[in-house]
Amino acid sequence: MARASGLPPETVVARRFDTVFPPCGNTRLREAIEQALALGVPTTLTETLNGEVFPLRCPDGRKLRHNVLVSRYEDSSGPCCLIQVHDITARRAAETALRRSEDHYRHTVELNPQVPWTADAQGLIETFSKRWLTLTGQSPEEPLGDGWARVIHPEDLPAMLQAWTASVQTGAPYDTAHRVRLTDGSFRWMRSRAVPRRDGTGTILRWYGTTEDIHDRKLAEEASRRSEQRLRRAMETQTVGVIFFDPAGTIKEANTAFLTFSGFSREDVAAGRLN
């Protein structure tokens, strides 16, 4: 008690408890003392003391938090009240820091545009962010295990399962593009990636992954590919020779008409042998 209060023991002995710690004039504490002396029933005061855990301010300005156990005991002078004060300041600080850390992690996961998820060593989904439920309309239980597969496009599912199985068996990083069915029934392109966490012996403990929306990028890539194919077909139907140069002036491509009347092969074009 002397260490908790910051007072020398000789200044505490024989003084009323509420003169050493003025906050202890609280009605709840007085009732606990009276109950202990009259009935011998011990009482623990925690969050019930003015909504606090027995706040104390030491002479050096420190603010301590405690649990208080009030009980009765007998000595040569008769019944006495024993008040045990347990310093929980460090524990409360650790609990507050943990809550803040958990809150920070929860918002990091829930507000992330990607979908973080984890799977066990066998590849069965264990956790995922709420964003997956928002996107797919699945219930919290449905994606667990291999339930996530129910919202994968049927054309993409076989290759996706094959890639995931191979990664789980070999421990190789997982990376695949696929389509996911949304709540409105439409499909969007996603990219799922995962890497394993291992113990000291190299054994896989868990997989950590993310699923991100790549729909717009995928459509842009497909549009660019179709445009290139149309250009190539148009070039091949030309009756005049067509050659393409890069910014450095190197010939990169030529159509069939050019190769026919020039006598060069595609290998010559690729190797730059057009002299």
Image (cartoon, grey):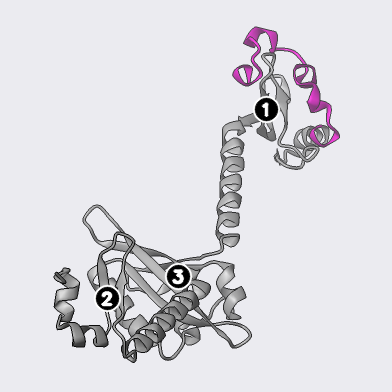
- Badge 1 local density, few (<14 within 10 Å), some, or many (20+)? few
In magenta stretch: residue 221: no
- Badge 3 local density, few (<14 within 10 Å), some, or many (20+)? some
Q: Left or right? Give the position of 150 relative to 231.
A: right
Are dots 1 and 3 in contact, CB under 8 Å?
no
Element type where label 2 sits in the image: strand
Give the spatial CA distance, label 3 vs label 2. 51 Å
Camera-nearest residue between 275 and 269 = 275
Residue 74 numbered mark, or none: 1
In the image as oriented, which residue stretches furthest toward the top? Answer: 10
Question: Which range of residues does the magenta coloring cover?
Answer: 1-29
Location of the C terminus by quadrant is bottom left
Q: Position of residue 143 (x, y in %)?
A: 50, 78
Q: Which residue is mark 2?
A: 253
Camera-nearest residue between 132 and 176 = 176
Q: Earlier in the sequence, mark 3 or mark 2?
A: 3
What's the magenta bit mostly, secondary-structure-wise?
helix
Give the spatial CA distance, label 1 vs label 3. 57 Å
User: What residue type is disc 3 on?
Assistant: Glu
Q: Residue at x 83, y 31 (%)?
A: 26
Element type where label 3 sits in the image: strand
Q: Residue at x 75, y 37 (%)?
A: 52
Residue 145 can be seen in this image: no
Question: In front: mark 3 or mark 2?
Answer: 2
User: What residue type is disc 1 on?
Assistant: Glu
Q: Residue at x 29, y 83 (%)?
A: 241
